[in-house]
Amino acid sequence: MARAQGRRAYLVYMNSLQHKSATATFRRLHKSGCFLLPNPWDIGTTIYLEHLGFKALATTSAGFAFSCGKQDGRVRRDEMLDHIREIVETTSLPVNADFEAGYADEPEHVAGNVRLCLKTGVAGLSIEDNSRRTVAPLYEKKLAIERVRAARRAIDDSETGVVLTGRCEAWLVDDPKPLHTALDRLAAYAEAGADCLYAPGVSKPDQIAQIVKTVTPKPVNVLVSGFNHQLTYSELADLGVRRISVGSGLALAAWGGFLRAAQVIKTNGTFNLLAENAASADLNKLFRRT
């Protein structure tokens, strides 16, 4: 009994050290230069992205939701916490959690949920201002700021040093003046304690440059996903972007291959697209170590 308790205590201690190391590494990545933050959606994709040599990873709420047969935003809080913990425990890399809107409206409830997310061992997490309401798709500005401030307090109280990203969803909710809204809100979120700022959907170089200038010296994350974003890593780095993520982009790439192959099999009765599949031998070799 005593030996088992000692073993558990040792594992908890080692996990704590690993989490602290990952968080410190994640913070250093935000200090200078530009780094890629790809988004796996399950254990296998997490292992492969670490195998490729990326320095950090981020979860994707949409990618995980689709893998569960759910719409983005329809995954329950506890399901998401279990998923985040699974990704964290799969990799030695820092993991940033797409924690959506914090699974609550009121700041004090956001703080409570952030505390739960911190227990998964994440090195970073994001809080967005998308209310998912038709009439007012963004939280009212004052409330949105208080929600970021509440998340900041929860992280500070934990003394974990986890990186907080403040997200403005203006482009994603078709705000009539997305740049104006994003500049105004991201500056406010930075003031409220966000370590990194993020406006998914922005793609024009001059607009990205304006966001970077507005929140400097704090780092900016840019989402590259879909056909509306033609900028390269080097071009984004030259604009002053510190962090580049792909959101559900990789998950949708996998879904794209699956949908095309399945549709051709059903419609034409042919199987030629399967020739483009990954080799099972390569995946068996990769996963042999797990």
Image (tube, rainbow, N blue to C red):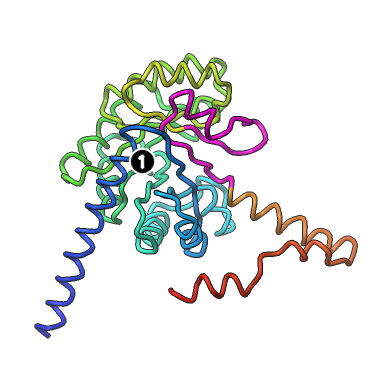
Amino acid at dot 1: Ala
Q: Is residue 198 left or right of residue 148?
A: right
Q: Is residue 221 magenta?
A: no
Q: Secondary structure at mark 1?
A: loop
The magenta-colored residue range is 222-249
Q: Is residue 119 visible?
A: yes
Q: Is residue 175 left or right of residue 24?
A: right
Q: Which residue is the site of mark 1? A: 104
User: Quarter holding the C terminus?
Assistant: bottom left
Residue at the spot x=66%, y=54% of the render? 255
Check the image and report above or below for 182 versus 124. Answer: above
User: Quarter holding the N terminus?
Assistant: bottom left
Q: Specify the quadrant of the image occupied by residue 127.
A: top left
Name the foreground residue: 113 vs 204. 204
Farthest-out residue, bottom? 1
Residue at the spot x=64%, y=38% of the render? 226
Residue at the spot x=36%, y=29% of the render? 219
Farthest-out residue, right? 268
Name the foreground residue: 12 vs 54. 54
Check the image and report above or below for 250 versus 230. Answer: below
